Amino acid sequence: MIILADYHLNRQAILLGGSLVAGGWLDIVPIKLVTFEVVNLAADSSDRLVWQFVQNNGMLLLTGNRNAKGEDSLEQVMRQENQSTSFPIITISDPERVNEYDYRERCVERLIEIVIDILLNILERVLQYFLLK
């Protein structure tokens, strides 16, 4: 599962990625943390564009920004466009605390739980599809 780190979380994404590797999680759960640069998104991309990008590409978005200021704010876009099949947006409540080992490890554990839940849900839908055929 690909997780796009919001532009303002590049440093935190590096730290989280390091914890994923050090903890051996990448041997168990298919997670890839990517940045705007890797996926060719401009740093000043609107929240609406970022939302549409992650949804169209089956990615999760990792962000520290969920305000409702403006028509294209992430919170407003989610209220308007969210559907039961939408991929979730993962918000780190205090991005600066990712520097703290314990907080970072809790974030990594929660990321793992979210990804496993999504993968299990996808597997369940695939199995239901083939069993109903």
Image (cartoon, rainbow, N blue to C red):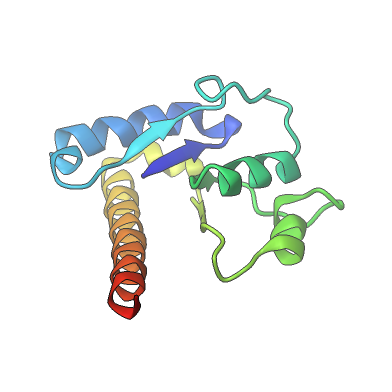
Residue at the image position 34 percent from the left and 35 percent from the top: 32
| Vertical order, 21 against 86 (above or below) | above
Q: Quadrant of residue 117?
A: bottom left
- 42 left or right, relative to 120: right
The answer to whether residue 23 shows anywhere in this view is: yes
Say which residue appears at 15% left-offset and 46% top-offset.
28
Farthest bottom residue? 132
Q: Which residue is found at the position 28% from the left and 70% from the top? A: 127
Q: Can residue 64 be seen in this snapshot?
A: no
**From the image, which quarter does the C terminus lie in?**
bottom left
Q: Residue at x 43, y 33 (%)?
A: 12
Task: Answer with the quarter of the image where residue 54 lies.
Answer: top right
Q: Is residue 37 left or right of residue 20?
A: right
Q: Quadrant of the N terminus?
A: top left
- Residue 132 in the image, given as x and y percentages of width and height: 34, 79
Q: Nearer the viewer, residue 86 or 100?
A: 86
Q: Nearer the viewer, residue 57 or 50?
A: 57
Q: Give coordinates of residue 53: x percent, y percent.
A: 62, 40
Residue 105 in percent (x, y) is at 26, 47
Q: Farthest front residue?
A: 133
Q: Looking at the picture, does residue 111 appear above or below residue 128? A: above
Relative depth, front residue between 121 and 18:
121
Quarter of the image holding residue 125? bottom left
User: 24 or 27: which is nearer to us?
Assistant: 27
Q: Can you give x and y, in whole percent of width and height, for residue 121 in the image?
A: 35, 68
Q: Residue furthest right?
A: 71
Q: How many marks?
A: 0
